[in-house]
Amino acid sequence: MPGRIINGLKTVGVNNPVFLLDEVDKLGKSLQGDPAAALLEVLDPEQNHNFTDHYLNVAFDLSQVLFIATANTTATIPPALLDRMEIIQVPGYTQEEKIEIAHRHLIPKQLEQHGLTPQQIQIPQLTTLAIITREHVLEDAKPETISDTADLALPPEMPILIDFHALKDILGPPLYELEVSERLSQPGVAIGLAWTPLGGKIMFVEASRMDGEGQLTLTGQLGDVMKESAHLAISWLRSNAKKYHLTNAFGSFDLLDNTDIHLHFPAGAVTKDGPSAGVTIVTCLASLFSGRLVRSDVAMTGEITLRGLVLPVGGIKDKVLAAHRAGLKQIIIPQRNEKDLEEIPSNIRQDLSFVTASCLDEVLNAAFDGGFTVKTRPGLIDSKL
């Protein structure tokens, strides 16, 4: 039989249809062939005007066909195939958008499937908000919320109200708990913002010091770029230790003098990489060596340089949405990312305070209560005695 492309053209009966290639990031090889290699000729505008189906062995012009591909991540798409695509990033939903989608589409669909009406089961928006998880996708409502309730005996005059207490009986305990304030109850902890294919998320960075030989230990499944950011952060702090009066346990401005440092990024089973954690690592280490707590309502993102500059990063919208979901109030971003704030819904921007930083001095001043002032030496007093 002809291949899927030619067969699809035969089905629609036109030479300029729209083809949807769903989840091309999951293409795999088999004994029957490599789909990614076959798509190279299909998607290449220099070749697809003379595409040859191996079954028919007849050339066909695909240049009028519009191909739309979807993927959760571009990391697993073969580079040669990715070069033939124009990438359009689709941002995730806000909590308000998720609630509207659930109440307009998903919940009515579940009620209809179980033979129920909105008059029999009432689900307030606060209940929907409690169901929503930290992912930015919303593929389906919780069907067990409706199906478990459908087994109950319904009094004809009394609808069932699914409030937060009923939700715990139906779905069990919450999958996630907000633990920001508990995690920041001691020096050496800071909150960063990370981007994943499933959207933004908050990321804790923890630091500890101990007697040793000046070793830096990094744990948490870190990639090479993130490891370099950690070494960059400790180098900048060591070169500015006198400026900020940062000392190790022995009172030395050489922070690694007889001292080992351990940096840990929790969720150790998840691989982490990228340069955007640079400002978070610096803040975490500054908290450790100054003995001061980082503000519990602050999260940050940004790449750093050895001279203390803060460089722009990607995924600002998703990162800000993640911070908002976590209840954080102030976000530190690179100054050159200020333009990206226009993509954030106005109601979320109003709930948050943004600090745009061009250097690490500005980051530290915003991350600590009362600022992170530079320690200056007292002036010498002239005397003629």
Image: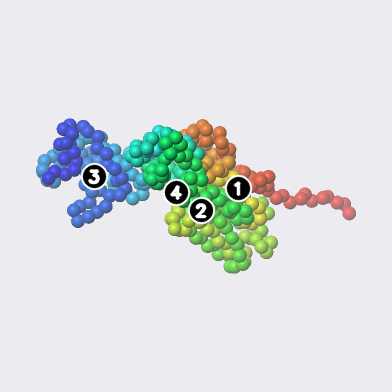
Please report whichever mark, 4 or 2, sits nearer to the chain's N-terminal start: 4
For image coordinates 62% across by 43% down, the residue present is: 366
Q: On the image, numbered disc 1 is attached to which residue? A: 296
Q: Residue furthest front?
A: 156
Q: Position of residue 36 (x, y in %)?
A: 25, 48
Q: Residue furthest bottom?
A: 212
Q: Position of residue 129 (x, y in %)?
A: 48, 41
Between 357 and 219, the one lying in front of the other is 219
Q: Amino acid at mark 3?
A: Leu
Between circles 1 and 3, the one closer to the viewer is 1
For image coordinates 46% across by 36% down, the residue present is: 158
For image coordinates 50% across by 35% down, the residue present is: 341
Q: Quadrant of the N terminus?
A: top left
Q: Secondary structure at mark 3?
A: helix
Between circles 1 and 2, the one closer to the viewer is 1
Q: On the image, numbered disc 3 is attached to which residue? A: 39
Task: Quadrant for residue 234, please give it.
Answer: bottom right
Please report whichever mark, 3 or 4, sits nearer to the chain's N-terminal start: 3
Between circles 3 and 2, the one closer to the viewer is 3
Mark 4–mark 2 Cα distance, whole angstroms, equals 41 Å
Judge from the rendering whether residue 42 lies leftward or rightward of residue 146; answer left or right: left
Q: Mark yes or no: residue 194 visible.
A: no
Q: Which mark is residue 229?
A: 2
Mark 3–mark 2 Cα distance, whole angstroms, equals 38 Å
Judge from the rendering whether residue 237 lies leftward or rightward of residue 344; answer left or right: right
Between circles 4 and 2, the one closer to the viewer is 4
Mark 4–mark 1 Cα distance, whole angstroms, equals 30 Å
